[in-house]
Image: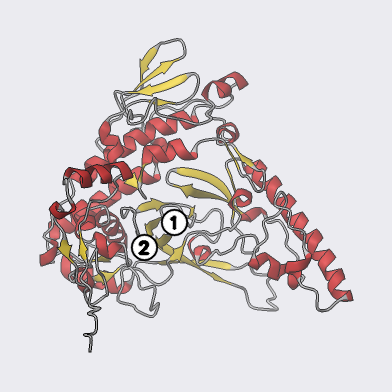
Amino acid sequence: MTEAPNHNAEIYYYDIGDYLSREQKLDIIASFKSMKNLPFTRLKPNEHGDWISQRNDKFGTWIPIGDKENKDNKSTFFAPVYSRGLATARDSWCYCFSKKQLERQMHLSIDFYNEQRKLFANEKAKNPTANARAFVSYDDSKLSWNRGILNYCEKNKTIDFENDSVRLSLYRPFCKQNSYFNVAMNDMTYQLDKHFPSPNTKNLVICIQSIAGKQEFSPLITNCIADLHFNGDTQCFPLYWYETIEPEQNSLFGDDAQIVRHEAVSDFILERAQGKYGNKVQKEDIFYYVYGILHSKSYRKTFSADLKKMLPRIPLISDYEKFWAFSKAGRKLANLHLNYEQIAAYPGLTIESLENKEYEVASSKNTPGGELFVAEKPKAGASNSEYEYYEVCQMKFPKKGQKDTIIYNHYHTVKNIPQKAYEYVVNGKSAIEWIMERYAVTTDKKSGITNNPNDWSREHEKPRYILDLLLSIVNVSVQTADIVDALPDVDWEKE
C-alpha cells in the first residue's frame, strides 16, 4: 500500500520592492548569483487571509473615515454622503477642454439619441418584441451606447440638453476640463449631486483611492466634480453636503426648490475631538486634520498594506500640539492644491527660447499673512501669434531619465527643475508628469473626437496658461514635499 502524498505545500517569498521596472527587478535577482542566496521568508496567512502585504492590527482599532459596507455606522469621520467620482462611460463626449466644443458634442450626441429613440418607438409599435439593443445604430462618431442609455431608449425617454449640466471638473490631477454632468448622459453620478447640486455650489472634497492597489496611496483635494479615475478609483469625502428640498405640490406661490447645506464631518467625530482637544476644535479643523494625516509618510508607509485593501482609519492622536500641527499642515496643503493655478513659478527655473535666450522666471514667496504670493499672469486679448507661440502638442523630456529639463514646445524649453519636485507623486506619477501627459492634443479612436488643451487657453484668453501651469506645478510640488517632510513624527503603535 502506497502512502498518500502530502498536499500541505509551504510558500516562500522574497519582497523585491515596489515601483521597480522589469529590468531593475532582474538586476536585483541576478546580483544574488543563485536562487539559493535569495533571502526567502516562509509565508503564513493572517486572520484576514493575507499572505503578503499583511494588514496591521493597530489600524483596525481606529475610527474609519467612512464605512462603505454599513452606511448606518455613525462612528466615522464623515457622514455617509461620500461618493465615488463621476463615471461617464463616454469620456470623449462628456469631457473637453473647450466648453463650446463640449456643448456641440453633447447636442450632436443627444440629437442622435432622440432620433434613434423615435425610430425604435415606431418599430416597437409595430413589433412589441423589438429590443433597443438590437435595433439602434452603433455609430461611435455620434454616440457611445451603454446599458443606461439603452434603457432610456427602451422606455422612450426624451433627453434634452441642459445648460446647468455643463460643469467645471477635475479629470486628472491638476487637469481641469469642462464636463457634462447629467444623470441621463453619464453612466453613474453616484451621490455627487449632494456635493455639487448646482454649477455655483461651493464645496471642498478630499479624494482618495477606495483601494490603493499597486499604486502608493495619494489623497488630493478638489473644489469641483472629480472624475472616477481622478486619482485612482476615487472616493470623494466632502466638507459639506447639500439637501435639495422640492416645493410642495400645488403650491400657490410657485416656490423653487431649496438647497440646504449640511456639514459632512460627523457629529460623532466632533464630539470625540472636542472631548480630547477642547471646544476650540471645529469640523473644518478636523477636515484639514484628515488631509494632513493622509499625507504623513510614516502613516502611509506603516499602513500601506491596509490602505491597499480598505478605506483609511485614522486616530485622534494623543498629542494636542500634533493634532493642530496636522490640521494646520492640511490647511496649507489644501491651499496649494486648490489654488495651484495661482501659485507663482518655482524660483530658479529658466526658460530657453528658440532664439537661445534664457530668462529666469518669477520667484515665489509667502507673505506675512500666510497667503501664497501670486505671480502676475498674462493679460487678456492676446493675438493669434501669441497663442501659437505658447501652444503645446506634447511635452517631453530630452531623454529618458533627464528630468531637470522639459521641452515644452518648439519655442520653449524649461530648465533647472529640481529633483525634489518629483517627490510629490499622485497615483503613481509625479504632479509634473501628470501635466505633461494630460496637456497634450489627443484624438479618441472610436469617436474621432480631438481634445485640444490649447482651446482652454484661448477660451480663457490666457495664451501662457499651460506654460504657467507647468511652472506653478513645479513650485506646488516642492512646497508640498517641504510641508510633508515637516509633518510631526508619530509613534503609530502607541496611538
Q: Name the one closer to the observer, 49 or 100.
A: 49
Task: Tell me: 348 left or right of 149.
Answer: left
Give amino acid for label 2: Ile
Q: What's the residue at 40%, 72% (across, down)?
A: 80
Quadrant including the N terminus: bottom left
Instruction: List x then y, in percent, for residue 58.
Output: 17, 70
Q: What's the residue at 42%, 66% (across, down)?
A: 82
Instruction: List x then y, in percent, for residue 8.
Output: 22, 77
Determine the CA span between mark 1 and mark 2.
24 Å
Instruction: List x then y, in percent, for residue 180.
Output: 61, 53
Considering only vertical position in the picture, is 313 above or below 342? below
Tally of numbered tags: 2
Quadrant including the C terminus: bottom left
List the residue tagged with mark 1: 203
Q: Is label 1 in a helix, a strand or a loop?
A: loop
Which residue is situated farthest in the bottom direction here? 1
List the residue tagged with mark 2: 211
Q: Name the one closer to the observer, 493 or 456.
A: 493
Give amino acid for label 1: Asn
Q: Is label 2 in a helix, a strand or a loop?
A: loop
Whether residue 372 is visible here, answered yes or no, is: no
Task: Between label 1 and label 2, give the one nearer the viewer.
Answer: 2
Crowding at dot 1, Cα within 10 Å, few <14 / some 14-19 / many 20+, comes out as: some
Which residue is situated farthest in the front direction here? 1
